[in-house]
Image (spheres, grey):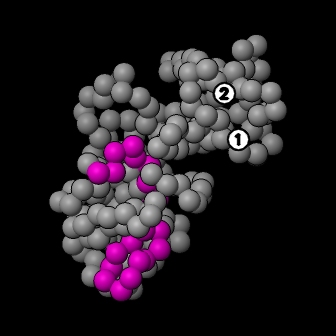
Amino acid sequence: MAHTEYDADSQPTPGTGERLRVARIGKPHGIRGEVTVQLFTDDPAERLAPGVALIREPGKETTDRSTASLTVTAQRWNKQICLLRFEEIDDRDAAEALRGSFLYIEAPAEADEDEGWYSHDLEGMSCIDASGTALGEVAELITGPAQDLLVVTTADGEEIMVPFVEEIVPEIDVEARTIRLNPPAGLF
């Protein structure tokens, strides 16, 4: 998965157990309606496979405000960029009109707690250090091929990318909505 661009659009996120954000549509690719996508899933081969029906929400700057769902007809990779084609889109202009849209799938009714975290589970949680000092708030979880990253927004608005590994993120308290961090010197 490639995260070639980071954009902290404040789009609505799905409620727990309802929908899972899997991608954001980028620019068109070619003239037949294919688009690039920024991935928010660790399993694009399954979640964005041909035949999968996706729920679409337009972004702030998206011009197509009416298309509510898209059905994947093809997925391929161009270097590290995922490209998708949809049954409902057949030309470059229609693809351009979708730019900035967020794509969701229906989330499983029962998520296995041991499988990991979804971005919407962690967004808004407070990050503290071992002494309880506030470090910031989770803006997003970015999944990557080597490791995941927590994007933490500090009180002064700076975004810090924290490797989501047990040594640095040893404890997540879901009920208290806090994440204890052991950041390396100089990260915050």
In the image, 167: left or right of 50? right
Q: Nearer the viewer, residue 57 or 80?
A: 80
Q: Is residue 8 visible?
A: yes
Q: How many marks?
A: 2
| Crowding near the residue tagged with mark 2, few <14, some 14–19, many ≥20 C-alpha atoms within 10 Å | many
**Residue position marked by numbered label 1 in the rendering:** 160
Looking at marks 2 and 1 on the same chain, the residue that comes earlier in the sequence is marked by: 2
What percent of the width, then of the height, locates residue 175?
Answer: 50, 18
Q: In this rendering, would 188 be left or right of 124?
A: right
> On residue 127, which mark appears?
2
In which quadrant of the rendered view does residue 10 lie?
bottom right
**Position of residue 116 measured from the top left corner of the image (x, y, whole percent):** 41, 29
Instruction: Tell me, yes or no, if residue 25 can be seen here.
Output: no
In what quadrant of the picture does the C terminus appear?
top right
Q: Which mark is residue 139?
A: none
Structural crowding at the residue carrying mark 1, measured as other residues with C-alpha within 10 Å and reported as few (<14), some (14–19) or many (≥20):
some
Q: Secondary structure at mark 2?
A: strand
Q: Residue furthest front?
A: 79
Q: Which residue reaches farthest top?
A: 131
Chain part drawn in magenta: 24-45
Q: Is residue 93 above or below residue 6?
A: below
Residue ID at (25%, 67%): 74
At 29% across and 71% down in the image, what residue appears? 85
Q: Position of residue 93 (x, y in %)?
A: 39, 86
Q: At which x and y percent is residue 36?
A: 42, 68
For badge 1, the amino acid type reads Ile
**Mark 2 or mark 1, whichever is nearer to me:** 1
